[in-house]
Image (cartoon, rainbow, N blue to C red):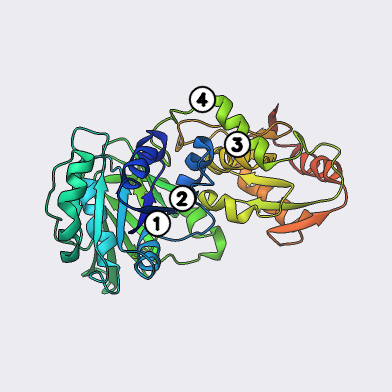
Amino acid sequence: MKISLVIHGPEVIDSGEAEIVMEKLSCIGEVEAQLGGTMGKTAVLDAGLENVIDISRHLKPSACIESFFETSDLVCLLNRGKTPETGMIFGAKVTSRLKDPEKKPLIQIESPGCTGGKLIPLNKKAGSYIEKLSEIFGLPVESPLPFQDSVCLENCPKTGKTRVIRELSGVFPGENILVNGLVIGKALSSEIRIVSESGFITAIEGGEIKEHGLEKLHNYENRDPVDLAGAWVKSGEIRRGNSLFSDARKENASARKSGSISWAGAGTGKVVLIDHAAENSYELASGAELAVTIGDDTTAIAGDILYRLGIPIIGITDGDCDNVTCETKIFPGSVVLRLIEGSDDIVGKRVKQELLKGQNSAVFEDLLAFKEDVLKLAELSIEAVFEY
């Protein structure tokens, strides 16, 4: 029997649950595992599991499941929600996106290493396997939650415009609220509704807006609209906990991806600019020797990811960090600039326009000279320079 496992999020990997689940499933069949989503890639590298868990594709969990439906006898979704309820809500949401949810047996393995761990049959065909998996994992079976769409449309009586409302589940007061990887506000309650009109976020009910985050989300003066219904929205940290794996294994992860420990004196190389969507740094930095990261949170997230790939950064920050990641490592040879408040985005725009000629990447003959050019552009705003 061929069993396909879709792994969602870094938590099930950091906790060691993913390895245990794969081992137990291998007792009843041939197991193929693939990461669904983006942020778990770092955890996979830290755990040294990149040869066991496929991280080569950038697919949502629902797309992974549909791909496995074509080749597998049984498909399992492994997840660890902030709470058992949010985990079940996630499973219902993923199932709702499937074109043919009954094509093959589909079972959610939710938080198997936690007290509230459970197995959830996500379709009718799962019934033929659910009892066997319950015996193997020692987990109770619970019926799936009915899907409730987190997005609704309302007519605004004041403007007459249609508003898109996106509700968040499992939110804790004080958590950051992120849209497409950018912090746009902070939760003041457990009930959060993000409101947008004509593609522009206008309010966070139950929370407070971070104006600078919204400016960045909508690309400043370009005023790019955002599809709130289809956006990646979450609360809390990008990676909720620390990996159980030692720093030595993380060092090995970076060593496997790089033939050198520093870009200094490397000569010619590709430079990429990352000023948003830091969670996509694996794809954005493909083939790069150096990355320029704009903003505190982007630098923290992208720097941590690129550490595993052996890619140094020039980080441009101004001290406005929202602590979206609990642990950050920066590759040796990197430089992070701390500028006066509000200057990081201004300098970032100049780097793009003046050095990268308006593009998000370019090849330079002398990376050291490029670094000096960045420092020269930023020199009037620099408060501190941190070298790694």
Residue bearing mark 2: 181
Q: Tag 1: residue type?
A: Trp
Q: Which mark is residue 246?
A: 4
Is 224 placed left or right of 359 in the picture?
A: left
Q: Tag 3: residue type?
A: Ala
Cβ–Cβ under 8 Å for marks 4 and 1: no
Counting residues from the start of the chain, the first of labels 4 and 3 encountered is: 4
Please tell me whether mark 2 sits on a helix, a strand or a loop. loop
Q: Tag 2: residue type?
A: Gly
Counting residues from the start of the chain, the first of labels 2 and 1 encountered is: 2
Please tell me whether mark 3 sits on a helix, a strand or a loop. helix
Q: Residue 335: percent from the left, percent from the top?
A: 71, 34
Cα distance in 3D space between marks 4 and 3: 11 Å
Is 297 placed left or right of 21 in the picture?
A: right
Report the front residue among 61 and 317.
61
Counting residues from the start of the chain, the first of labels 2 and 4 encountered is: 2
Residue bearing mark 3: 253
Label 4 crowding class (10 Å Cα cut-off): few <14, some 14-19, many 20+?
few
Cα distance in 3D space between marks 4 and 1: 30 Å
> In the rendered image, is residue 296 in sight?
yes
Please tell me whether mark 1 sits on a helix, a strand or a loop. loop
Counting residues from the start of the chain, the first of labels 3 and 2 encountered is: 2
